[in-house]
Image (tube, helix red, strand yellow):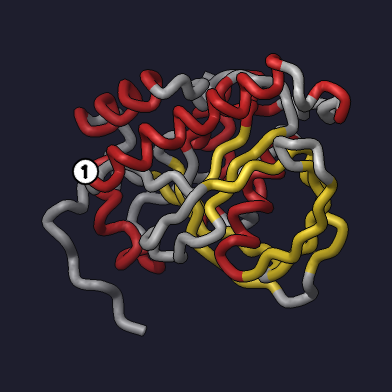
Amino acid sequence: MPASKPSALLLPPDLYDVTAGDKRRTAQEKLLGMLPPQSPQLSQPVPPVDPKLIPAPVIQSVIQKLLIASGSQRQNSQERKTHRMLVGLAAPQLGEPYRIILIDERVTSARTHGGRLTCLINPKVVWRSRETEEGREGCFSAGPVWGLVRRPVAVKVRALTPSGDKIERVFEGFTARIVQHEIDHLDGIRFPDRIRSDRKRHWVHAEEIPVYPENIQHWPRLCSKDRWKRYISG
């Protein structure tokens, strides 16, 4: 397959320094309450929520905090293409040590047609499909690092709702990718850690986000595992 045509928004391949766009994006994410990628908390697993505590203000306030942060970001994403489109969020990303996530069950892999976010407490994958698929991922908690991650195309998840009800759901396609990505956050794992090939881990500046999808297979600025580790260690 031939490479995509160069875009005027692509920056020099050896440019790893922070750009003006990167600074603006970092400031916006800080306003949302996101922990910086260098925060040690993002690499630590969090314990399950005691089901008896779900109705308590401490847990309900965390859920509201997640909804407020995600709602603000998704509105901004429609206004400026350099914003990340939030399709999921985990409590640890906001510095809250609880196994609580939000996922968009409607959004497509092109990050369009976003729907209402579903809250899952203590989500656990109890089944994974043998079939896997490679797909693009980015994350507030990975900064400028994006990449191609291989994951099962379907998973079965057991969880609790904000009302404390037990549920078991099968997620497929892009939604399955989202839920696996967010559960990883609860275990202190970020998606670049799951990428084995350095050629599939990329350094993407904020100015380049709109053209990244069309150039992903031939992205000129790679991010080695060592560079990723250095970045999150500060």
Examine the image and state in which quarter residue 90 appears. top right
Up the image or down, 218 lies above or below 163; here it is below
Quarter placement of the N terminus:
bottom left
Residue 30 rendering spot, x and y as whole percentages: 39, 20
Q: Position of residue 134 (x, y in %)?
A: 58, 68
Horizontal arrangement in the rendering, residue 65 relative to residue 189 (left or right): left
Q: Is residue 138 left or right of residue 171?
A: left
Q: Position of residue 57 (x, y in %)?
A: 69, 15
Q: Residue at x 46, y 48 (%)?
A: 146
Residue at the bottom extreme, as displayed: 1
Please identify the residue farthest to the left as the structure is shown.
Answer: 8
**Which one is nearer the viewer's eye here, 30 or 218?**
30
**What residue lies at 18% left-to-right and 65% top-to-bottom?**
6
Left/right placement of residue 204 relative to residue 135 reads left
The residue lying at 54 percent from left, 30 percent from top is 66
Crowdedness near tag 1: few (<14), some (14–19) or many (≥20) residues, C-alpha within 10 Å: few
Q: Amino acid at mark 1?
A: Arg
Image coords of residue 228 (percent x, y): 53, 37
Work out whether 130 lies above or below 147. Answer: below
Is residue 44 visible from the viewing direction of this image?
Answer: yes
Query: Relative to 196, does residue 121 appear above or below in the rendering?
Result: above
Closest to the observer, 155 or 219: 155
Residue 121 placement: quadrant? top right
Name the residue nearer the viewer: 166 or 3: 166
Q: Is residue 47 left or right of residue 109?
A: right
Q: Tell me the SS state at disc 1.
A: loop
Query: Residue visible at 53% across and 47% down?
Result: 117
- Asked whether the viewer can see residue 199, the reply is no
Outermost residue, top side: 58
For label 1, the residue is 80
